[in-house]
Image: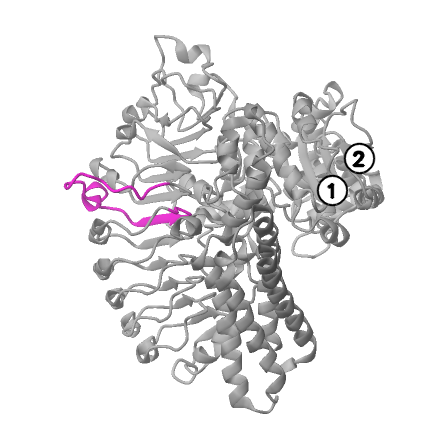
Amino acid sequence: MVDCAGAALGAAFGELFGLVKHLVMTIAAFRSQLKKIKATLVSIEPIIMDINKFNDQLHRGPEEMAPIKELLDEGKRLVDKCKKIHALNLCMKYRHSRRLTAFNAAVVEKFQLYMPLLGVRDGKETLVGVNEIGEDVKELKEWFVRVNGRALQSELETSSDLAVPAAPDFFVGAEVEASLRKLKEQLLEEGASVIVVTAPGGCGKTTLLKKLCHETAIKGKFEDKIMFVPISKKPNLTDIVQKMCQHNRLPVPKIKSEEGAVYCLQQLLNKIGQSPVLLVLDDAWKESESIVDKFVCNDIKDYKIVVTSRYEFPHIRPVHHLNPLTHDEAVELFHRCVTVDDRSMRPPDTQLLNEIVEHCKRLPLVITVVAKSLRGKNYAFWKKKLNELSEGHSLLDLETEILACLRKSLDDLDGDPSIKERFMDLGSFPEDCKIPATALIDLWVELYKLDFDGVRASTDLHELDYRNLADLVSPRRDSRDDTDESYRSHYVTQHDLLRELAMMECDQGEVVNRERLILDLMANNFPDWWREQKQQPLCARLVSISTDGKFSTPWPNLELPAAEALVLNFRTNMQTKTYALPEFIANSPKLKALIVTNYSFFPTELGNFHVIGSNLRRIRFERVTVPFLNMGKICLQALEKISFFMCDIGQASTSNDAKISDAMPNLKELDIDYCNDLVRLPDGICEIKPLQKLSITNCHNFFALLEQIGQSTSLEVVRLNSCTVLSLLPDSIRSLQNVRLLDISECLIMSALPDQIGQMVNLKRINIIGCPKLYGLPKSIVKLRNLRKVVCEKEKAVMWGALKNTLPSLDITLFEEEPNLGWLGHDSFRRRT
C-alpha cells in the first residue's frame, strides 16, 4: 500500500512536470506563467522524490502527502486547460493567467504553511541511517532522529557563507588561462581527487578558483554542490561542517567535539555525494594539513577537492604551481588598473612604468593596488612612488617584500589620511570573515563623527573598493533597492595579505599609545601587560578583542578612558552557556559604538548585560540571545541605533515596569534581521517619538505590526520585506505622513494594502516584489502625489499602470527573479507547523 502511495505521488508530479515542460515550448500565450511553475517544480522535485523513497523504507502511510498529491492533480487539470484556450480569447486568457499565477503561489504557500517539508525529508533520511549508527556516537543519534530537527537558524536567501564569491571582471596572462583549462579538465574527469594549487601570496590563487567555479562546464557538473571554504590560519572544523550543512539546506547539528565534527562531516558527504561535489579549501596554511585530511573521502565516486595554499603538502598530489605574470602580462594588468572610467591613460614614462612593475614582483595583487594609487597622477608622483618601492628591496624575502610594497602604497592616498584610517579599521574583524557593511558604517559614524545616515561612511567603503584595498560585495537582489543606499545586505572582504598589512599598521608603537588596540586571545592567554596589577590607562580610540571557543577566564580589568568604539568577536563551544560582556565596558566613559558578534553557528546568551552604559549611541548584536523586552531594564539614554542580526530576542519580560521607550527614548533606528523568534514588537516601541527607521526583515514568525504604529509619526523608512506570515498592515499606518519608503517585498500572504494608504502623503517609493496574493489597489492610492517609484513583477505592473494618468511621474520598475525555495528549509517554518 505504501509503495502504491509513493508511486502515485511520484506519478502525479511527473505528469504535471512533463506537461508543463511541453506546454512551455508550445503554448506562447501562457509561457510566462508556465515558466514560473516549471521553476517552482524544479525546486521541489528532489524533495518530493526523497520523501517517497524514505516513506517506502520506513513503511509510512500516504496520509501526510495526500494534500500535496491533490494540489498536483489540480495543477495538472489547470495546466492542461491551457491547450483549450484560444490565443485571441483575451478574456479567458486573462482569467486563466491569474489562475496559473494563483496555483504557483498556492504551491509555495502549501510548502510554507502546510508542512515542514525539508524537516520531514531530512528526518526520514537520517532515520534510515540511524539504525546503523554505533553506540559510540549516541549523542549524535539524537540529532539525526529529530524529524523536525533544528535547521539553519538564519539561512540567508541570497547566498550562504560557502557560496562561490563573484568572478573577477577580467584575467590577464596566458599561464592563468592555461591553468584554468588544466584545472577544468581535471575537475571534469570522473572520480575522487585532491588537487593543490600553490603559489606565493598575491599571485591570484583565489581569483583563479573563483573564475574556475563560475565556468559553465563546472557549474553544469557540480550545480549547487560547489562549496568555497576559507581555511585561514586557525580553522575551526565544527564551524566549517555546520556551514556546509547550511549550504546544503540540511539540519545543522550542535557539535560538541572535533570527533563529532568529523562524524557529521562524513555523514554529510555520504548524503550529498550521490551527485558530484566540489570543495574548494582556500588559503590552507601549513598548520592546517590535518584539517585538510579530514575532508578526504575516497568512497564518494565523484568528489573533488581543490586546496589553495602558499605551501605544498608533500602527501597530496597532483600539485599545480601558479607562477607570477610575465613582464608583458604584468604591464598589461597595470595598464588596465591605472585606467580611469574606461579611458586609456598613457603612463608618464614607459621605462618608469616597467621599473614599477618589476618592483611589484609581477604579482597581480601588488600591481593592482599600486596601479590604482597612481590613477590620474603626474610624472613627479610616479617618480616618487618608484623611489619608495625601490628602498631596501634586496634585503627582504618575498612575502615581506610584498607587504613592504603594499605598505608604501598607503603612504600617500591623495593626501587624504582618512582612507588609510578606514583601511586599518578593517583589522578589527577576524580574518576570512564577511564584514557586514552596516557594522563598518556604524563604527565609522561614531568614531569619526560622520552623518547619522552614513552617507560619508558608505563613500569611504566605495573608496576602499575602488583602490582594491577591500572588496565591497553587493548581492544581486539588492539591485532592486538602488535608490535606498542602506547597505543592509552588503559586506566587505579583504585579501589575507592586505589584512596582514592592516594589522602591521595597527601594531606600530607602544601598546599604551596605540590608537587601535586589536587583540586576538587564544584560550585564557592574556598578554603580560594586561595581567599586570599596575596598568596604565590605554589611549586606544578603537578596541577590538577576539576570543576562541576555549576562552573562559573572567575578564581582567582594562582601563579605556579614550575608547569610542569596542568590537567584540567571539566563538563559543557547546559547553559555554553564556558569553560575559567585559566589566570594563561600564568604566569606558567615551564609548559610543559597541559591536558584539558571535562567530559560532548558534546564538549564545549574553551575560553581564548590565555593563552596557548610557553613553552608547550605536549597538549591533549578531547571533546572541538578548531578550528585547528585558532591555527596558537598562538605561540607554543616548542610544540612536540598535541592530539585531540572527539573534534570539523574542523572550518576554516578566517586569511590568520595563518600558523600552523609557530605556531608549532617543532611538532613531531599529533594525531587526533574521530574528526568527520575533512574533511582535513590544508596545513601547511606538512611544519612541524620534524613531525614523524601522526595519523588520526576514523574520518569518513576525505576523503583525502594532496598531499603535500610527503614533510613530517621525518614521521615514518602514521595511518589512520577507516577513512571510505578515498578512496585513494596520489601518493606523495612514498616520505615518513622513514615510518615504515602504518595503513589503516577499510578504507572501499579504493580500491588500490599507484602505487609507493615500494619507501617507510623502510616500515616494513602494517595494512590492513577491506578494502573490496582492491583487487590486485601494481607491485612496491616487492621493499619493509624491509617489515616484514602484518596484514589482511584470504581472503586478498592470494594476499600477492604471495610475499613470493620475500620477504621471510614477516609475514602475519591473523585477524578475527565478523562484527560490531555499527558505523552505528554514527552522521557523518547521516550528510553525
- Check the image and name the residue furthest to the top: 533
Most common SS among magenta residues: loop
Q: Position of residue 565 (x, y in %)?
A: 38, 32
- Check the image and name the residue furthest to the bottom: 88
Residue 430 visible somewhere in the drawing:
yes
Query: What mark, if any, has residue 208 been given in the picture?
Result: 1
The residue beneath circle 2 is 322
Q: Considering only order in the chain, which callout, 2 or 1, is on the residue closer to the N terminus?
A: 1
Instruction: Please state which of residues 103 and 305 is positioned toward the viewer in this rendering.
Output: 103
Looking at the image, which residue is at 46% across and 63% down?
109
Looking at the image, which residue is at 33% across and 43% down?
642
In magenta segment, residue 658 = yes
| Disc 2 element | loop
- What's the magenta region? 648-676
Please name the amino acid that badge 1 sits on: Leu
Decide if residue 757 is on the left or right side of residue 394.
left
- How far is the residue under mark 1 from the one under mark 2? 9 Å
In magenta segment, residue 294 = no
Please name the amino acid that badge 2 sits on: Leu
10 Å crowding of disc 1: few (<14), some (14-19), many (20+): many
- Check the image and name the residue furthest to the front: 1
Which image quarter holds the N terminus? bottom right
Vertical placement of 703 versus 388: above or below? below
Dots 1, 2 in contact, CB < 8 A:
yes
| Disc 1 element | helix
Q: Position of residue 416 (x, y in %)?
A: 52, 40
Residue 481 visible somewhere in the drawing:
no
